[in-house]
Image (cartoon, coloured by chain):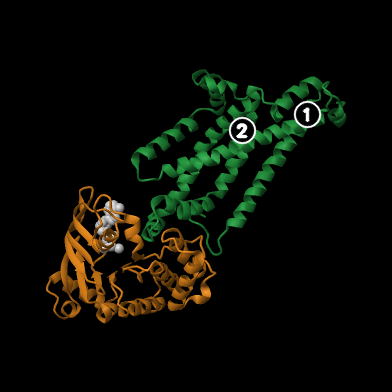
Chain colours: A orange, B green
Amino acid sequence: MIEISNVSKWYGSFRVLHDCTTRIEKGEVLVVCGPSGSGKSTLIKCVNGLEPYQQGGIVVEGISVGAIGTDLPKLRSRLGMVFQNFELFPHLSVMENLTLAQVKVLGRAPAEARDKGLKLLERVGLKEQAAKYPAQLSGGQQQRVAIARALAMDPIAMLFDEPTSALDPEMINEVLDVMVRLAKEGMTMMVVTHEMGFARKVANRVIFMDGGEIIEDAPTEDFFGKPRSERAVQFLSKILRH
Amino acid sequence: MNFRWEWDVFLRDTGGGQTYLDWLFSAWGWTLTVAGGGWLVAIVFGSVIGTLRTVPQRGLARVAAGWVELFRNIPLLVQLFLWYHVVPALIPPLKSLPSIVLVIFALGFFTSARVAEQVRAGIQSLGRGQTQAGLAVGFTLPQTYRYILLPLAFRIIIPPLTSEAMNVVKNSAVAFAVSVAELTMFALLAQEETSRGIEIYLAVTGLYVITALAVNRAMALIDRRLRVPGYAGGAR
Ligand SMILES: Nc1ncnc2c1ncn2[C@@H]1O[C@H](COP(=O)(O)OP(=O)(O)O)[C@@H](O)[C@H]1O
Ligand SMILES: [Mg+2]
């Protein structure tokens, strides 16, 4: 469903991504890990065209992301994205956060959008918070609203960029629980995270990035069982110790 | 010193069948018209120009930067004379426009450069996150500005916009230079005719102060109406 082929990207003369290739099948969960600055955010943002790339290709359900003439807003509306810092719209209520794009992008009737919003808030356990504003919620609640906002567009796949790394430890699980359920329901997901418990539980494959390269790309069991590269071994021993 | 207030000067006839009080209030009306019109022009153009300064299209951003430099760096009085004497000479149809319209545009464009800078700063204080979040749900870039970035930016910049709005009231005094019968013009003429400069200037000062305070209150009201529960706003 998502095919990343030999993608390279530069910031000026600095190469952020080097010849990255991987793919995600429908219903699969791909976990992306690697040290800070290795290009994980950049790679995931290339998938929905938030970041342009200079070489290679990314194809999402037959649509080439980098091609001239691609309707990027339409493509993005079909790919849900969840950010490290939530990025809810602070001037809109929780319900408006969920309905605005449904109405303005998908053209849904406001009543229909509200129904959808309520259903999703119920699903992430926040139905009572519909009238509140983002700043009145805890970090974990905000991130669950952000997931609901993305799901409101009926995405064909979800992209998560370190969804729990800005959260206090006691809130991480409430967000991971929502993600695990989503994965088990068959959602196609690309997840940048260091939550290896989550990866073991639901990932089909794990890729390890370092210095803009995909060093390791393996089925989850193989990745944790016998990682091949020295750097992945080191990285794993570091984060698993915590 | 043998000074006596003579506030009844305002009841004297100007010679044209109206009192100085009538004239004072009509002058206040012109001041409000110039300031209000100028503010409207400033907000419309300032919002557009300030927005364009932040778009990824380099050409548009550069044109907008040129606008700001042009209207910010020439003294207001000089701009007014340019509008009054030079622009109509270059574009003859403008000759038929009344001075009040030229003054409103001169003041409006001058202030638009300053408003544009506030709008730009407000948008930039939001960082890339909100833009990316807007684009990620499928908004086009204009929709992202319309629904996300501008509503947030305006909330953040209400305090500096308040002082710009008050500046417009004060700056409307330049209109006397092209013979618009606003408060400053009234003050100059009336004190000459009546020799009661003290009362005249105090009255005019009072009206300027009342106007500025009203603007201030209005902006505070807008600020309160737009305030988001729990959200302090980017720069505040
Ligand atoms: N806009 C930018 N301009 C220049 N360099 C950038 C920019 N964004 C990210 N980088 C650099 O690209 C590299 C990869 O960043 P990122 O994808 O955010 O890494 P990660 O998400 O793995 O921590 C980092 O070295 C970062 O400093
Ligand atoms: Mg990152």
* Classed neighbour count for the residue bearing mark 1: other residues with Cα under 10 Å, few (<14), some (14–19), many (≥20): some
User: B175 left or right of B2?
Assistant: left
Residue at 83 percent across and 27 percent down: it is B18
In the rendering, at what x and y percent does residue A202 appear?
27, 79
Instruction: Give, as a three-letter code, the residue at label 2.
Output: Asn
Front-lying residue, A82 or B90: B90
B118 up-or-down from A117: above or below: above
Front-lying residue, A122 or B113: A122
The first of marks 1 and 2 along the sequence is 1
Q: Is residue B132 visible?
A: yes
User: B226 left or right of A70?
Assistant: right
In the rendering, at what x and y percent does residue B134 appear?
40, 58
Mark 1, chain letter?
B
Mark 2: secondary structure: helix
* Classed neighbour count for the residue bearing mark 2: other residues with Cα under 10 Å, few (<14), some (14–19), many (≥20): some
Q: Quadrant of ligand 1?
A: bottom left
- The residue identified by callout 2 is B171
In the rendering, at what x and y percent does residue A97 appear?
47, 64
Mark 1: secondary structure: helix
B57 up-or-down from A18: above or below: above
- The residue identified by callout 1 is B23
